[in-house]
Amino acid sequence: MADVILEVKDLKKYFKTKSGMLHAVDGISFSIERGKTLGLVGESGCGKSTTGRAILRLIEPTAGQVLFEGKDVSKLSRHQLRLARKDMQLIFQDPFSSLDPRKTVAQLIAEPIVVNRIITDKKKLDERVAELMYTVGLAPRLFNSYPHELDGGRRQRIGIARALALEPKFIVCDEPVSALDVSIQAQILNLLKELQQDMGLTYIFITHDLSVVNHFSDDIAVMYLGQIVEKAPSVELFDHPLHPYTEALLSAIPIPDLSERRERILIKGEITSPINPPDECRFYKRCNYATDACRKNPQLREVKPGHFVACNRLEELNRL
Amino acid sequence: MDKDLILDLKNLVVRFETEDGIVHAVNGIDLEIERGHAIGLVGETGAGKTTTALSLLRLVPKPPGVVECSKMELDGKDVLNMSVRELEQTRGKDISMIFQDPMTALNPVFSVGEQIAEAILLHENVSKAESMKRAIGMLELVGIPAERAYDFPHEFSGGMKQRVVIAIALACHPQLLIADEPTTALDVTIQAQVLDLMRRLREQYKTSLIMITHDLGIVAEICDEVAVMYAGKIIERGTLQDVFNRTKHPYTEGLFNSIPNINDRKAMLTPIKGMMPDPTNLPEGCAFEPRCPYAGEDCKRPQAKRDISETHSVLCCAYDRPGFHIDRKERS
Amino acid sequence: MEEKRTYDIAELKKYKKRSMLSEVWRNYKKSPSAMVGLVIVILLIVITVAAQFMYVFNEDIVYNDLKNRLLSPSAEHWFGTDQYGRDVFVRIIYGAKYSLSVGIVSVMIACGLGMCLGLVAGYYGGIVENIILRFCEIFIGIPTILMGVALMSAFGQGLGVLMLAIGLVYTPLFARTTRAAVLPVRDAEYIEAAKIAGCSDLEIMFKHVLPNSLSPIIVQATMGVASGILTASSLSFLGLGVPIPTPEWGAMLSEGRELIRDYSYLTLFPGLAIMTTVLSFNLMGDGLRDALDPKLKQ
């Protein structure tokens, strides 16, 4: 029996706007086993960050359940939530805006420990901070520096140290490397991977960049307009993408390699409005294979063991 | 000597004299681009890519910027000593730039059609009606229906805005187009559309292109040549084949090894250790030396450019050592 | 098994904190006008404090010396004497404490109240914000002097009441400034980061939101001292502030008003005193605004 640490059931988050209901996340379900990584991939506006925040209840979900170790996070009281957050942390996308500019590195890393009253002794606290700094690879001389004196990579390490300070079991990584330079990206990705191995962490890795996530994830879920359109083990998804959107997304990535020139699959148009979406396939207007059969919103169904796709024309197109 | 150069740049130096010290942004760059070629200027934040581009348009703010250069010729014309009037004529007509952020590059109070028409009116002796007609033609060329010409920028999505920016940049058929990370702010599927568009337009107009990017993948898609920049210097320059398949500089190698490649998923990422040197305090020798796995004593001396072949050159003294070579393909 | 690492904390502490304050001071020093303002304010405070030791209220400030009344400025009486024969210079430097203290204390009241209101309004938003803002708007709509007059006549005269009245009058201004400064901070990602780290609302408000929205409030406070002094003087001039014969500058102006044709220096010097003080506080405020501007940081 698999050890499921997090299970999301039919999670929905709608925002009220002037022109109607914005369906940011529209009924998604998935589960993650302990120690594994789920990549949540999609373009801007697909609801991937909203999903991450709704799981941590940084925003209140409109409907659905988030079961963390069997407990429904969306039903916890304020106090219980505070306790639960020790186990569930978040690493932010932008290391420039996610650190309070008026706090030093040490203060920033110590904050989660202080506010949760885990270590009250000043000397022990400093030691713990120094230990965390070592874990994430920050030089001790940065102890009293301010974040604005540091580059993006080091700031992101502060963010990671903060997330680790409470010894969580589960971390949502919200595009942790997309604001960083490529040579620094690799440093941070490797760090996150090492930490996962050392501490048995479970990750949700949110990103728009499929090439980043494949290095990292056991499973990948592709989101489009608030719904998961395809979910499969990482290798399977890259080798046999079944949903037309996944296919286009994969082919759109520029490859730094001259040996293999591929035929590019361009999809037309841009993401459609998430406000009051009609009950048809969310990808209908851009899909190269769309027919009238797609005027009905497809369900995510298991077409191969572990491979889920939401597409009405899958059999017709002989994509299996 | 028989090369038809659109841009001939010799020993460009740009520094910013600020209160906290002198920032050495560009430290002696030679850049020759043949007419009709597309060159990718690759490097990370702070490598001096954008500053190089801005100095070609003479748009480096001074003070604090100081631009020195022994030769800067655009299509045979000396840009360095142009009068303000001549400069205005040149910008937009002979040389044009696409900026990274399409959200801020457009004026929110004019319709997109008017903004394209304005670019045409500035440089060509045509009537207002004629310029608007051509503007609409440009919009259709970049894939925006004519009826949207009178819409305002905020009514467009990011990808659409970038198309408008491209239309403005190409409105007067410039000889040289500089694109500064034109797709960084866009989603991958939209990026693919925009790159596709740029490739088609370049073929159609035979425009020379400088593509500034940090993404080697984009370079492989659309450029003929590559110049890799590090700390204000071009450290490797060559054709796509040269740089991608016969990589010579350790930094270029490091870049390739640190980017995830979806065709080669098993490979472990090998990051470059450390980080960019402080541009106010650059080492005298090779700026990459502190991060370089092959660094030796000889790297502490100033480096000289070394020609590997007709098209390929590298700035690295390790090749003075007998038997030194980098073989990227072997590692993966 | 990983070896147990030891960390020499004393070693870490060596890398000293470069405080934000020293940064601000470095920027502040660059503006000559701001430095002039600061020097004058410091000078004023020093002189006032010294004057409290040099002069005795009953003997040097409030007395009649009819022999020496209405003397023109001279070496002996720098600013001349008034209709009761009192030295105007002594009265002005002694009286600076009233103006300064009214200015500063009233701003402290306004700042304290306004900051809390603004913080709550900005952080929570929604209906709470609406109520606080509408309330502020109503108060700002009433002319300052009128408000002061109403409060003074309700609570009676006196220095304390004057401070409280002016403080209350300026509270809505601080509330609005604070709220405006809080809004962008409230939506910053580091607030979310604090939430996920386990901070309570109160901790977030006072540890993160307030320190990051302090700059405009400090500027407003400095400028507020100047306006406070002006308002206090105006009220005293109207006879509603500090009662005569206290040498409050506004009150002195009022006393000299009847003799303005023949003895203009009686109004000139208190007027100049008010002007200089207000001006130097405003210069300081301007300088602070520039020094605290985050765009100049980096």
Image (cartoon, coloured by chain):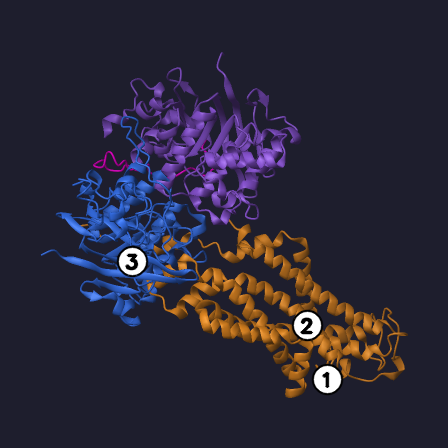
Tell me the kind of residue under disc 3: Asp
Label 1: which residue? C243
Secondary structure of residue under mark 3: strand
Residue B60: in sight, yes or no? no
Chain B tint as drawn: purple
Find out whether the residues at labels 1 and 3 contact each other: C-beta distance under 8 Å.
Answer: no
The structure residue drawn at horizontal position 22% and vertical position 41%, both measured from the top left corner, is: A241
Please name the color used to draw chain C.
Answer: orange
Whether labels 1 and 3 belong to a single chain: the reply is: no
Look at chain A in the picture and name its colour.
Answer: blue
Where residue A251 appears, as percent x and y from the top left, is: 29, 37
Which span of residues is magenta-colored? B260-285
Residue B179, relative to residue C85: is it above or below?
above
Residue C117, can we see it? yes
Q: Residue furthest top?
A: B2
The tag on residue C229 is 2
Tell me residue C129's x, y (percent).
48, 71
Q: Nearer the viewer, residue B187 or A255?
A: B187
Chain letter for the residue marked with disc 2 in the picture: C
